[in-house]
Image (tube, grey):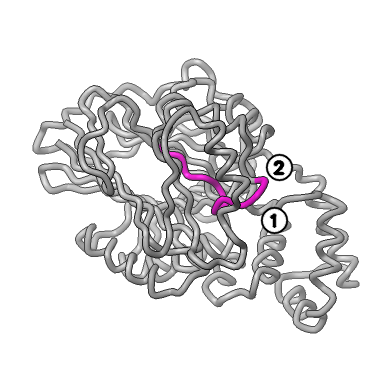
Amino acid sequence: MINIDFKFRAVGQGAFYTGIFKHFNGKQFSFVYDCGTDSSRQYIEKEITNFVSETNNQKIDILFISHFHRDHINKIGELLNQTGGANLAILPYLTPDELVLAYIDINLSGGIDPDTLAFIQNPAGFLQERKVDKIIFIHPSDEGDSDSEDEPQEIKTDLDSPDFDFIISNTLKPNNDILENNPKVEHYYDKGNFSIVGFWEFKFFNKTRDITTLNNLCQEVQNLLSLPTFNLSDLADYITNNENTFETDFNQIYSRNFGYGQLINDTSIVIYHGAIKTRKYRKWFGRLPGWFGSGFTGTLLTGAIRFNQDSLNQIQSKWLNQKYFKKTSVFQIPHHGANNYIESTVISSYPNVKWWVINFGLGNTHKHPRQEIIDIIENHKIQGNIFPNTQINTVEYKGLYR
């Protein structure tokens, strides 16, 4: 028997999601999806302490990072310091130009703290310095899964054995186009499967980006700085010395190239996770009494992706197996419920969602979640309820797998 505990933790305007599996033989497996906030640090610091206690001071098994905005990453350093590191980190790969854009985004949204700056300058170096043993960068693929790759590899596992262990199976497609001199860093596409053998699976989606347009944007930024080449230090100096004009100038450049939206949000890794077999899995919702049945076990974590029709088309073409849509019962609304970040066709494409979770901070200046998004969910969901995840509301759901 395995006890399972998932939490959207109470961190306010940010994200800190955790999963903890504990087998009856005493072994455990934990994962984290993002760790950051723009709300008062006291809330997330308390939740980090709680997580460390709940995992018995053991290293994180997998740290997932959705994207590189401050409110999703600015407490990762503290988390890793308290847990003693992680066995594996999985995060999106950003080109040098995308890293520059992430730096600009964070500066324009209220400044950049030392940990976030260090992370953006060198994500792999930042993580390795904080005792992450292995790093996997995920790249968007240009093709969907083949029929033979729709399911995780069938491996018989005796969950009742006292010798049971949580073993990872990685059948993602390698990306061999990136020359990596670090043996602890690997690159894969969001194609294939990743699972805890015979038990739990993770499915990744990374949206295809328009790199040509991004290159054009960066060239215009370079022209604005009047430098033949530039690095983050040059950019920081220019922003400091032209604080009153840079935001306007940059927004004009951005609008010419991308129109509405934030590209770094669209680099978010979307992750489905759920039981490979559901016959013996039962789940209950932590804030409500009673069992909620055994049929649909999946959770969809969306980071801050702009989940519009284009994203839906891409994810449907990559995830040919419709089970990932049918088995999703918990759906994280992207980008704290901001306007234009989810569309009605997305909501109606997930017919069995029981819990629509929105992470936001009470009193946030962005006025998240927007009423327009609440109305889209209410008017187009097949079933389920909306649950707020704020600095005073943890959304927790548990299960027994036996």
Residue 112, given in percent of the width and then of the height, sits at 61, 74
> Is residue 333 highlighted in magenta?
yes
The residue closer to the viewer here, 287 or 74, is 287
Residue 40, given in percent of the width and then of the height, sits at 46, 74
* SS label for mark 1: helix
Quadrant of the rendered structure where residue 295 is? top left
* Label pair 1/2, CB-CB below 8 angstroms: yes
Q: Which quadrant, please, contains the N terminus?
A: top left
Near mark 1 (Cα within 10 A), the count class, few <14, some 14-19 or many ≥20, is: many
Name the residue carrying label 1: 98
Closer to the chain start, of discs 1 and 2, is 1
Region rendered in magenta:
330-340
Name the residue carrying label 2: 209
Using the image, determine if residue 142 lies above or below residue 232.
above
Label 1 to label 2: alpha-carbon separation? 10 Å
- Amino acid marked by disc 1: Glu
Near mark 2 (Cα within 10 A), the count class, few <14, some 14-19 or many ≥20, is: few
* SS label for mark 2: loop
Determine the residue positioned at 69% across, 56% down.
98
- Asked whether residue 199 appears in the rendered view, the answer is yes
Q: Is residue 288 left or right of residue 201?
A: left
Residue 386, given in percent of the width and then of the height, sits at 44, 44
Determine the residue positioned at 40% across, 27% down.
327
**The furthest residue to the top:** 147
Residue 354, given in percent of the width and then of the height, sits at 39, 34
Determine the residue positioned at 28% across, 32% down.
199
The residue closer to the viewer here, 295 or 26, is 295
Give the mark count. Answer: 2
Q: Which quadrant, please, contains the C terminus?
A: top left
Determine the residue positioned at 59% across, 71% down.
117
Q: Is residue 361 left or right of residue 211?
A: left
Using the image, determine if residue 360 lies above or below residue 31.
below
